[in-house]
Image (cartoon, helix red, strand yellow):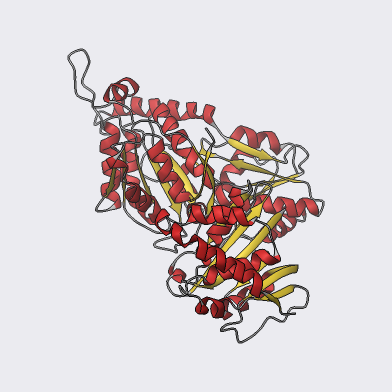
Amino acid sequence: MTEEIIIAGFGGQGVLSMGKILAYSGIMQDQEVSWMPSYGPEMRGGTANVTVILSDERISSPVINEFDTAIILNQQSMDKFEKSVKPGGLLLYDPNGITKHPTRKDIQIYQVEAAEESAKTESGKTFNMIVLGAFLKLKPIVKMDNVIKGLKKSLPTRHHNLIPINEQAITKGMEVVKKYS
Amino acid sequence: MAKELRLMKGNEAIAEAAIRAGADGYFGYPITPQSEVLEYLMAQKPYERTGMVVLQAESEVAAINMVYGGAACGKKVMTSSSSPGISLKQEGISYMAGAELPCLILNVVRGGPGLGTIQPSQSDYNQSVKGGGHGDYKLVVLAPASVQEMYDFVEKGFALSFKYRTPCLVLADGIIGQMMEKVELSDEKPRWTQEEVIKNSPWATTGKTANRERNIITSLNLESSVQEEHNIHLQKKYKKMEEDVMCEELNCDDAEYLFVAFGSASRICQKAMDVARAKGIKVGLVRPITLSPFPNKILRKYADKVKGMLSVEMNAGQMVEDIRLATQFRTKVEHFGRMGGIIPTPSEVVQALEQKIIGG
């Protein structure tokens, strides 16, 4: 099994940390992983994206130009990455702020109202975990207990009290994800 | 005990490895895309635990001269920077080669020339393997292709550097520095005691005792005959380095064509190799791990076996010259590369193989 994923959105949405948690979850179940961010001036307020690969085999290139899954969280990323999904692949996006919805017919397209659901919660900061939950519902490539272990490894110890909130957010994402076309 | 696994950036891995390898000092100056090395070390505060010095110098020139000073005392010292900063360090590197001082230097290459870009590149190949500074000298140059190798090459690099008493340069790039992968960590080794320093580096300035000659660390020799002798000695040493050539050969047994690539370009070639083989093209990959010493013999061995080699580099074509020399023009050798921080895609690489080598 090899899953090649791009997560793309605005800096500050938790794109990079979501990728890190996914990668750590892969390590927890003995997979090979790579996490390659866009870096540089675009990190500060502009677009941010990260390529995450999980595989049972040694990973060749950490930089790739087509993906099994694209998780898209803003319009700029939709414009850039809709075309990069492999035929038969998955495009998961939050429709919040999206003006031009995806049009491809040869891929699976799903929506998750993560911004809306996150705003309803007390902390309001679990946006990226709702998205992660939606992804894991569609592609359960890592087991939930390994995701929790991954969260523990990714978060500094002082934030470990937030793990239950994150777990709830992942569950919420699994509930609200819906097919678009 | 279970092995310790961590998800780390290449820059963090090399910093953690330095602490665990028992390094005595790190001297650096921030520059993208390698600033995490200094940041990580400052956050870990090894000076409170192992006594390892971590210092942000006032400039790259100051940092390399601090490394010179530490190395002259027989200490395991290192610095890191990215391309423009490494250019600034070249005077110090040449002096260290002349004075036969070991150290570890990390270059997380970004696109040039000049300030260039902060995106990944391999355009410092020539600078790394053919001197860089002035004078006839060579470094040991290691090219990691994974975060694990960033970690492993610290201990390996120090060992080779002390073996040959010449600086060891780890030639990474923005991809290897910035990406995160799984790293298996080794147990921490204590720093050398002063007795061990004296034993391991009897040439170092550790304080003259009555029973030995004065140790003098210098690269200056105004007597030409003496300086020529010194150069002959250095050249013999560089020749001997060939016994430590490291190279990875993948799918070469049945290969009709070869990719030759180092560092992150070799990772892209692995993917390109899978794509090409699925199309029925028998292509293998030779990945030089030591760029200096260069795996001449290994490439020469394949020169009579394959129909052609494609050197894939994130530059305008630098290593390709060394491959042509190694293969003595006995097979077709062409270059494919992207420049200025653009990363070639696997499909571009396969296309280049088809056009420049198979069809060309």
Q: Position of residue B69 (x, y in %)?
A: 25, 37
What residue appears at the point 62 percent right and 32 percent down from the top-left corner? B297
Count the marks. 0
Q: In front here: B284 or B299?
A: B284
Left or right: residue B305 versus residue B34 is: right
Q: Is residue A66 visible?
A: no
Q: Is residue B200 visible?
A: yes
Q: Is residue B171 above or below residue A160?
A: above
Most extreme residue toward the top is B211
Left or right: residue A124 versus residue B312 is: left
Most extreme residue toward the left is B210
Q: Is residue B22 above or below residue B261?
A: above
Q: Position of residue A139 (x, y in %)?
A: 70, 63
Q: Quadrant of residue B238?
A: top left
Task: Name the quadrant of the C terminus of chain A.
Answer: bottom right
What residue appears at the point 31 percent right and 53 percent down from the top-left corner? B29
What residue appears at the point 52 percent right and 79 percent down from the top-left corner? A120
Most extreme residue toward the right is B280
Q: Position of residue A18 (x, y in %)?
A: 54, 63
Q: Quadrant of residue B227?
A: top left
Q: Is residue B322 above or below residue A39?
A: above
Q: Quadrant of residue B305?
A: top right
Q: Position of residue B251 (x, y in %)?
A: 73, 41
Q: Is residue B232 above or below residue B130?
A: above
Q: In front here: B135 or B123?
A: B123
Left or right: residue A158 versus residue B339 is: left
